[in-house]
Image (spheres, coloured by chain):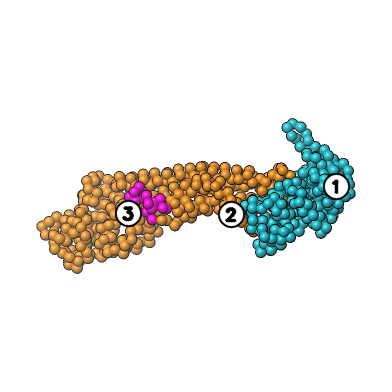
Chain colours: A orange, B cyan
Amino acid sequence: MKLKTFVWREIFERKNQLVTSFVAILLGISVIVAVKNITFYSEKAVARELDALGANILILPKSASLQDYYGADMQEEEFPEEYVTSLAMSDIQGLDNISPKLSVPVELGGKQFTLTGILPTNEFQAKAAWQGAGIFSRPENCGTVEVPGILAAPTKETLVRERVISTLEEDEALVGADVGATLGVKEGDSLTLLGKDFSIIAVLPATGTVDDSRVFAHLHTVQPLAGKGSVLNAIEILGCCNEISKGLVQKINSLLPDAKVVTITQIVDTQVKTNQMMAKLSLLFLAIIVLVGGASIANYMYSNVFERRKEIGTLMALGAGSRVVLKMFLLKALALGIAGGIAGYVLGTVIAVIFGPRIAGVIVLPMASLALWALGVAVAISLLASYFPARQAARLDPATALQEM
Amino acid sequence: MLSMKSVSKSYQHRGKTITALYDVTLAIPKGDFVAIVGPSGSGKSTFLLMFGGMLSPASGSVQVDGQSLYDMNSEQRAVVRREKIGFVFQTFNLVPYLTALENVQIPLFLADLSEEEQKIRAAALLERVGLGDRIDHKPSELSIGQQQRVALARMLANDPPIILADEPTGNLDPENAESIQEFLKEANDEGRTVVMVTHDMRAAQVARRTLRLVDGKILNGTHN
């Protein structure tokens, strides 16, 4: 016989008394697991939608007016390209992709289009100091998410979605869908813009925005062609949602006081509010389970100790020290915590998977990491709530416990 | 050897002071079989609990094999009980959710014996008390007499040199009572010191000597 034999036998002998405590911890853990599970996939879904929208922060000249988010750079005002360096060298977290742009009007085949100079990411990465600033490293738990397949997608898809392109030579150009259709050009053709020949490396898919009427070329090619120095019309940033909620826009504003920083605030705010509400809900349930579950377990344990006084006294008479008695009750609490944690995780996951699509409109999958969380919380609550009753049992006076002697 | 020197103990009950033991000095040599008799409330239980290291005296000292029990801490006294003392109670005090075998295993488990050893030794003891065919029965599935025999087997589990018995025949019919008396005598014949508290004079006859406890005082001793 081992100590666990005592514990198991006692649990099964008096399982009805244990049910209330088990149910308290089971319900508490399952609700938190369900909320956390749904929240995770809800955040992921919203973040994915936000990712699909592309850049969510725009840096414009101070005097610029914002008529169309996607065409915000189509204006006369400019600001220095050094702003990009300032951003890159700053310690601001959450700047996922930075895309500086200079747009100038061009006429092709009798129609007006826009020539937009962009900077490929390989030029950022080539600069060690910028890499050190970590612009292209996405912080953990960033609201933006990796969408399977996107990283391996063709360059033109990446440009449309993230408004960033990894490589672009000085004589290469990408043309929007309308430009391609109007001029009848395709990948591999050449195109003359402002007196310079460009090789078309891709015709971008239609987006339904002004981007369809753009020709994209290297920023440092467009600037001299347009007769301008190192200036920009706009910087587009794919900002991390969580960081936006923590004041990313204000931080950029402080860094670049002469620029205007705008964001798709409505979408971000909604997501941030949802996240905050879910986080508060999780905390609320955690507080409830700690109070109700803990109180229920403590109450049960005190009753159990009282009921088993004679048994404890007998064990002490037979030579059990206080440590054995303490361990006996804590082992029982551990078993209760493990059972409540596992059952709570399973029930919470089932609730999340079944009701997640109805509540949050997202597909919810089981999360193994929550199992560890559930187990840890349930065991900690159970052990903490049982410690004082267990200590009382260990300090029991055997003579009093054996009153009938 | 068990001894008490000038031991006193009193309780407060509903505002009154009740003297359980008063200036008791006593020596019980190794291998003795002493019956302590007396009316209810005479201090018999206090006497036994003190020898068991579970109730400290208000004054005086209690010694087991020359060691002063109450100069030890509670963990050390638990070791003394585990190694030297076998208890048997009037109400048997079997753990209700354990089988007869597991109940006998308790002192062996507390002494850190391997599970295999525990089972072999517990089964042999149950065989000795005539319950070899009841090892998997829980106390509720055993008769009163059988339950007391399980308690006797448990008492002997760690082969204790001292046995403290509290009214061991108090709840038994004459036939079972006699069998328990015989068992205690047998244990004494094996060289164990037996101290039995009882109010049954017939049960006391089995002891080598009888001490009478009245109002916390040892009045006289008779040799049987």
Left or right of residue B214, residue A48 in this image: left
Instruction: Specify the amino acid type for callout 1.
Output: Thr
- Would residue A378 be seen by someone viewing this image from the given angle? yes
Q: Secondary structure at mark 2?
A: helix
Q: Nearer the viewer, residue A33 or A7?
A: A7
Task: Give the x, y percent position of residue A365.
Answer: 38, 56
Q: Residues within 10 Å of mark 3 (few under 14, many from 20)?
A: some
Q: Which residue matches tag 3?
A: A48
Q: Quadrant of residue B182?
A: bottom right
SS class, disc 3: helix
Few, some or many residues within 10 Å of mark 2 (<14, 14–19, 20+)? some
Of the two numbered discs 3 and 2 on the same chain, state the one appearing first in sequence: 2
Identify the residue at horizontal 27%, vertical 63% (top origin): A155
Region rendered in magenta: A349-365
Task: Report the residue marked by disc 1.
Answer: B210
Image quarter where the N terminus of chain A lies is: bottom right
Tell if the residue under mark 3 belongs to the same chain as the one under mark 2.
Answer: yes
| Kind of residue at badge 2 | Trp
Position of residue A279 measured from the top left corner of the image (x, y, whole percent):
42, 46
Q: Which one is in front in this view, the residue at disc 3 or the one at disc 2?
A: 2
Task: Check disc 2 and report the residue beneath it.
Answer: A8
| Residue B8 visible in the current orientation | no
* Image mark 1: chain: B
Do circles 1 and 3 both sit on a common chain?
no
Most foreground residue, A260 or A35: A35
- Residue A14 in the image: state x and y as whole percent: 58, 49
Contact? badges 1 and 3 (CB < 8 Å): no
State which chain disc 3 sits on.
A
Q: Residues within 10 Å of mark 1 (few under 14, many from 20)?
A: many
